[in-house]
Image (cartoon, rainbow, N blue to C red):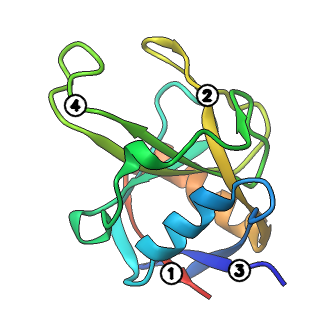
Amino acid sequence: MAKQLAFTFVDEKITTIVDLHEDLAPVTCRTIWKAAAKPIRDIAFHAAFAGPEIMIGLPKANQVFDPRKVPPENQTVRPGAGDVLFFYQGKNMMKGLGFELWELGLFYDEGGSTFGPLGWVPVTIFGKATKGLDKFAAACRDIRMHGAKKLEVRRV
């Protein structure tokens, strides 16, 4: 059985279970699994450009690896419903962005893309939400209308 992560909106207690793609993105899966030794907790925001995606920054306490050593694996610019991604952007890679971006993203519906201010950005898909996505997706949609929510990502 694949390793799994639980993505949970803390206040609503709504969870989706993500199966890791250890065969398609082995280095990324090992890396994120290591980062999740301590549950990842932060505020989840809705994507501005990507469509039906929520994202959470990786807190400093979970930044236990060198993101530049995580190779591109199982990349796409057209994630599907349930796809979970890792994205890293170094400091000053984009004009006006003088800090790093360490992100986990979850696409909760079809029709998404990873097209941003600088154009197409390939991302590594390292897992897929396989249980509880419908209810979780409704909570994701709610972020667009009512704002960010506290999210926890933990090992199952």
Q: Are marks 4 and 3 in contact (CB under 8 Å)?
A: no
Residue placed furthest toward the front: 69
> Which dot, 1 or 2, sits closer to the camera?
2
- State the residue position of label 3: 3
Q: Secondary structure at mark 2?
A: loop
Quadrant in the picture for the N terminus: bottom right
**Label located before the other in sequence (4 or 3):** 3
Give the side of residue 92 with respect to residue 30, left or right.
left
Q: Position of residue 109 (x, y in %)?
A: 75, 45
Q: Secondary structure at mark 3?
A: loop
Give the Cα distance between marks 1 and 4.
27 Å
Q: Give the CA separation, mark 2 to mark 4.
A: 18 Å
Which amino acid does the dot numbered 1 rest on? Arg
| Residue displayed at 22% across by 31% down | 91
Question: What amino acid type is highlighted by mark number 4?
Answer: Lys
Residue 10 visible, this angle = yes
First in residue order: circle 1 vs circle 3: 3
Q: Quadrant of residue 22?
A: bottom right
The mark lying in front, picked from 1 and 4, is: 4
In 3D space, how far apart are the residues under numbered discs 1 and 2 (Cα atoms)? 25 Å
Of marks 3 and 2, which one's residue comes earlier in the chain? 3
What residue does disc 2 label? 122
Q: Disc 1 and disc 3: Cα gap in Å? A: 11 Å
- Residue 44's spot in the image, x, y percent? 41, 56
Choose the circle earlier in sequence order: 2 or 4. Answer: 4
For marks 1 and 2 on the same chain, the one whose residue lies earlier in the sequence? 2
Mark 1 or 3, closer to the camera: 3
| Residue ID for mark 4 | 91
Give the SS element for disc 4: loop
Q: Which residue is mark 1?
A: 154
